[in-house]
Image (cartoon, rainbow, N blue to C red):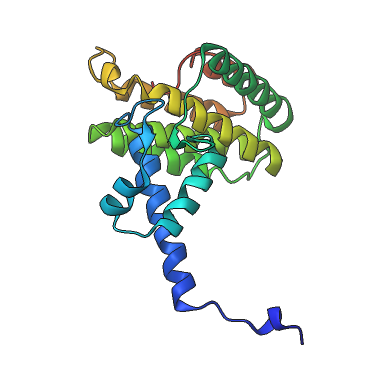
Amino acid sequence: MPAWHTRRVSDEELESHSLVDLAVSRLSREILSGRTDPGERLVEEQLTRRLGISRAPLREALRLLTEQGLVEHLPRRGSRVATLSERDIGELYSVRDVLERHVVDTALPVAAGTDLGGLRSALKAMTAAAEGGDRLGVADGHRAFHVALAALSGNRQLSLVYESVLVKIQLYMALNLRREAERTAGPMDGVRRHRRLLRAIEGGDRDVIVRELAAHGSRSYLE
């Protein structure tokens, strides 16, 4: 039997994998919460001390974050928080709109008995975050809701592309988290909009679904 059939994962490999996951989770949360600025350098020496990990899992975490579009690697200059131009943002919203229209055309109205658990779970998490004043949690719930919506198409590749677009849009919107907190419209407004959208999906009225998606606006993400 080939060696790769019998090889067992070592404790060291498991520990390294968990450290990578920890670093990805911590750094992505910091970036998407608006606690870091676009273009801010990610200094390895500082990060290894702060996260309590060695350079190997940190570099793997930075590589994964680069794949997600949250971090940029600059040759001979290290890594930094990703930056997005106005053109980038406009293109991302255009791609999002195209993908959502495809989902509406191919997956909605949903067939009887379709599992909408992912949508309901995301809405529940979004509601709890809004009630607790956790704006990042609201944004994460929003993204999870729309990813679950895209999954109704049954097209896995579409779902992967769609989520990657939403993560980059969330990076852009993270810049406005502090300003969002000062707005009169609170996070519960977004929860109510998603409740209406879920009811429209449950009801199977395609026109209402399209109208509720349009209510998100061309530049809306967190609300």
- Position above or below: 76 against 18: above
Q: Count the labels in the image.
A: 0
Please tell me which residue is depicted at 53% across the width and 34% down the height of the picture.
Answer: 69
Between residues 113 and 131, which one lies in front from this camera angle? 131
State which quadrant residue 133 falls in.
Answer: top left
Give the percent coordinates (x, y) of residue 202.
55, 33
Residue 175 position by quadrant: top left
Please identify the residue farthest to the bottom as the structure is shown.
1
Is residue 192 in view?
A: no
In this rendering, does residue 104 appear at all? Answer: yes
Q: Who is closer to the viewer here, 217 or 189?
A: 217
Q: Nearer the viewer, residue 1 or 189?
A: 1
Residue positioned 48% across, 13% down in the render: 219
Q: Is 55 on the left or on the right of 100, as rendered?
A: left
Q: Residue at x 26, y 13 (%)?
A: 183
**Which x, y percent locates residue 201?**
57, 30
Q: Quadrant of the N terminus?
A: bottom right
